[in-house]
Amino acid sequence: MAKNGVGMEIEALTKEIEDLTIHLADMLEATLHYAGVSDENLELGVKSYIEALDEVFDDEDGEMGYKEIVRVIEFLKKKKPLLFE
């Protein structure tokens, strides 16, 4: 069965979202690496970062700029210092 234009567009957008998700995950790993998280702790660092978002911002809605990202990393450095050794 041939896909219609809408179906093809949805498929293309879904692929783009998947690609952007992978790119964002890579950027988060790079950010944590430069913040001092060792390569062997990067996976745990990413999980910890995501969990810390709720703790740091406590259901706040808003944009995440670089200052907010730094705030989460500073929180992690205090709460999970072993990630940064």
Image (cartoon, rainbow, N blue to C red):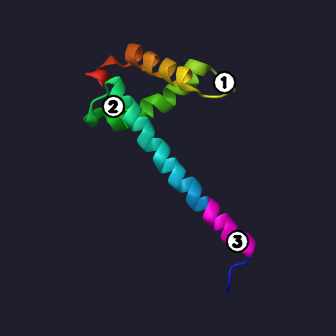
Q: Quadrant of the C terminus?
A: top left
The image shows residue 68, relative to residue 10, as above or below, that is: above
Mark 3 → mark 2, Cα distance in angstroms: 39 Å
Q: Position of residue 49 (x, y in %)?
A: 46, 29
The image quadrant that residue 42 belongs to is top left
Mark 1 → mark 2, Cα distance in angstroms: 27 Å
Q: Position of residue 32 (x, y in %)?
A: 38, 30
Q: Quadrant of the N terminus?
A: bottom right
Q: Is residue 45 left or right of residue 56?
A: left
- Please name the residue shown 56% across and 61% down the image: 15
- Please name the residue shown 50% across and 29% down the image: 51
The image quadrant that residue 79 belongs to is top left
- Please name the residue shown 62% across and 20% down the image: 58
Q: Is residue 8 magenta?
A: yes
Number of residues whose C-alpha sits closer than 10 Å to that of mark 3, classed few (under 14), some (14–19) or many (20 or more) = few
Task: Of the two numbered discs 3 and 2 on the same chain, state the one appearing first in sequence.
Answer: 3
**Three-letter residue code for mark 3:** Gly
Q: Which residue is mark 1?
A: 59
Q: Position of residue 8 (x, y in %)?
A: 67, 72
Q: Position of residue 26 (x, y in %)?
A: 42, 43
Q: Which residue is mark 2?
A: 33
The image shows residue 18, relative to residue 81, as above or below, that is: below
Magenta stretch in the rendered image: 5-13
Q: Are marks 3 and 2 in contact (CB under 8 Å)?
A: no
Q: Which residue is mark 3?
A: 7
Dominant secondary-structure state across the stretch colored magenta: helix
Q: Is residue 30 magenta?
A: no
Number of residues whose C-alpha sits closer than 10 Å to that of mark 1, classed few (under 14), some (14–19) or many (20 or more) = few
Task: Of the two numbered discs 1 and 3 on the same chain, state the one appearing first in sequence.
Answer: 3
**Three-letter residue code for mark 2:** His
